[in-house]
Image: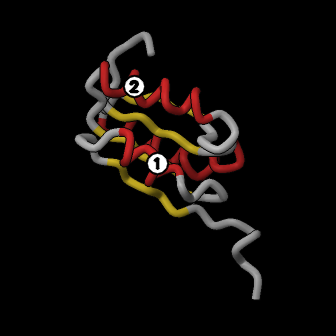
Amino acid sequence: MSKAIDVSIIMGSDSDLPIMKDCAKFLDNLGISYEIKILSVHRTPEKATEYAQTLKENNVKVVIAGAGGAAHLPGVFAAMLPTVPVIGVPIHTKTLNRS
């Protein structure tokens, strides 16, 4: 992370990006700095852990995490960043829409 940001928007897959872009638009309207990352804690746990460490070091104020197919993402980041609020955004998935 090269510049100071207030909010980190994360998601487990690029399929969550259309929903999470709405978070970015909202933050743009408020003039709040952010960055967007696609991270898979089950495919690349080391990368996710390293990113969480950079958030700690850079005093990020809030994490907004998409909870789609990777519904565990908000909880994992909340565990890694116990002093940072993590907001989980539920994302509808086709897999969970079975009757």
Pick out the residue farthest to the left: 83
Q: Is residue 2 left or right of residue 41?
A: left
Which badge, 2 or 1, is on the more N-terminal residue? 2
* Crowd rating for badge 2 (residues with CA inside 10 Å; few <14, some 14–19, many 20+): some
Which is nearer the eye, 57 or 62? 57
Q: Is residue 52 left or right of residue 10?
A: left
Could you give the CA–CA distance between mark 2 and mark 1, rounded to whole angstroms? 13 Å
SS assignment at label 1: helix
Write the residue at 76% across / 82% down.
Answer: 98
Q: Which residue is mark 2?
A: 53
In the rendered picture of this protein, how many numbered marks are placed on residues? Answer: 2
Establish if 16 lies above or below 8.
Answer: below
Q: Position of residue 44 (x, y in %)?
A: 65, 33
Quadrant where the C terminus is found in the figure: bottom right
Q: Position of residue 36 (x, y in %)?
A: 52, 32
Quadrant where the N terminus is found in the figure: top left
User: Residue 30 lies in what quarter of the image?
Assistant: top left
Q: Amino acid at mark 1?
A: Val
Q: Is residue 49 left or right of residue 85?
A: right
Pick out the residue farthest to the bottom: 99
Which label was assigned to residue 76? 1
SS assignment at label 2: helix
Q: Amino acid at mark 2?
A: Gln
Q: Position of residue 74 (x, y in %)?
A: 46, 51
Write the residue at 37% across / 53% down.
Answer: 87
Which is nearer the eye, 45 or 19? 45
